[in-house]
Amino acid sequence: MKKYFFLTLILLSIILFASGCVGDLVPVGENTTQDMSAYEFEVFLNNSYDNGTFIPTHTFYLSNNGSAKVVSILENQSIIKIMPLEDLSNQNSDTVSNVVVLGDISNNTNATPENIEYFASMSSPSSINYTISDDVIRGQKYVFVNFEEPVTGFVAYTMTTALGQDFIYITTPPSVVRYVLPAGYTTGNSLIGKVNPTPNEIYYDSDGRENLVWTNEVTTNGFLSMLGQFSSGNETSIEPIPKLISVKFYTKDAPRDLSIAGVVLGLVALSVYLRFKNERKKLEKIRNEFESQLYSKKKGNGKN
């Protein structure tokens, strides 16, 4: 009897464990909603080719509402690795949502400018299945979007952000990364919000939004090469080292408002100082008069 009991217990444990693992995978079905109108599929290919080789290009449309819309242009990519900055106050929300693919299986196409333009003009999402899973690696949570076959084209998704008007992304070179700030926002003020590292290019688009562009190349010289991990097959090659790109953005009026606030505070401080100085003079005058009267009385009593 005990034998069957323990056997049943083991089977239940296996079933529960398996169900937990499967629950992490979310296959795309016919009922999956893909709202492609939420994204801008711009043919942004600045510095996306190096001697004819395509470089992954990622555009982050930032906002101040706790989310960022990401549009990547990829070639022959079977998995997307995302390191989310979760909002601990809202752990019930999906870290990655509304995944939309405008592309094709890599066996059928290449990431040429003509093909990218064709994908951008598509009127409906591509029927390419994927799964979403997550894992904790070295204490950091990662979200993985796994495609059934390698994909070439646009892959867009919405990710939660936890830092408000701060955004951090860790990229693995080679890649092209672009941050599109919300309309009416900017960055770069050392007192209010900085961007690091310095972008390779800054420009404004037709909607008046500030665009920051970084071209991340694989560096094999200097300190970076000392940190690299040599592969066993070729000791002269070096694995790309992830780079952190951070930005803190603010309204364009923020520096002016800060200056006005500084002037007001300065005037208030000056007013308080002058008033304090004036009151101190009055008190010193009263004290001197009191001491003078006291001295006169003592002097008069001495004569008597």
Image: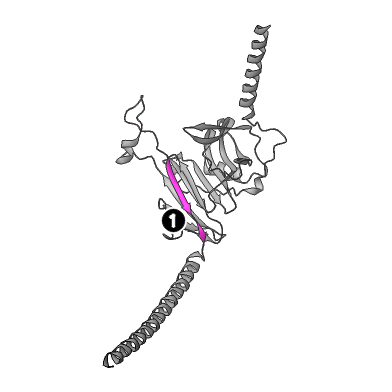
Q: Is residue 232 above or below residue 81?
A: above
Q: Residue furthest left?
A: 303
Q: Nearer the viewer, residue 193 or 73?
A: 193
Bounds of the magenta span?
235-251
x%, y% of residue 119?
60, 42
Residue 48 in sight:
no
Answer with left or right where residue 123 lies relative to residue 233: right
Res 115 quadrant in image: top right
* Residue 149 vs residue 23, the one in the foreground: 23
Instruction: Give the answer, above or below, for where 182 lies relative to 85.
Output: below
Closer to the camera in the image, 142 or 4: 4
Please tell me whether residue 248 belongs to the stretch shown in magenta.
yes
Kindly identify the residue that appears in the image at 40 percent across and 84 percent down: 282
Q: Amino acid at mark 1?
A: Lys
* Label 1 packing within 10 angstroms: few (<14), some (14-19), many (20+): some
Residue at 43% over, 60% down: 191
Q: Is residue 218 magenta?
A: no
Q: Foreground residue, 1 or 259?
A: 1
Q: Residue furthest right?
A: 31
Counting from the top left corner in percent of width and height, residue 121 is at: 62, 46
- Considering the image in quadrants, where does the C terminus appear? bottom left
Question: Residue at point 47% right, 52% down?
Answer: 247
Kindly state the secondary structure of the residue where label 1 is placed. Answer: loop
Which quadrant: the N terminus? top right
x, y percent for residue 277: 39, 79
Q: Is residue 56 left or right of residue 236?
A: right
- Give the image's coloring scheme: one colour
- Is residue 86 shown to the viewer in this render? yes
x%, y% of residue 286? 38, 85
Q: Residue at x 34, y 86 (%)?
A: 294
Q: Which residue is mark 1?
A: 194
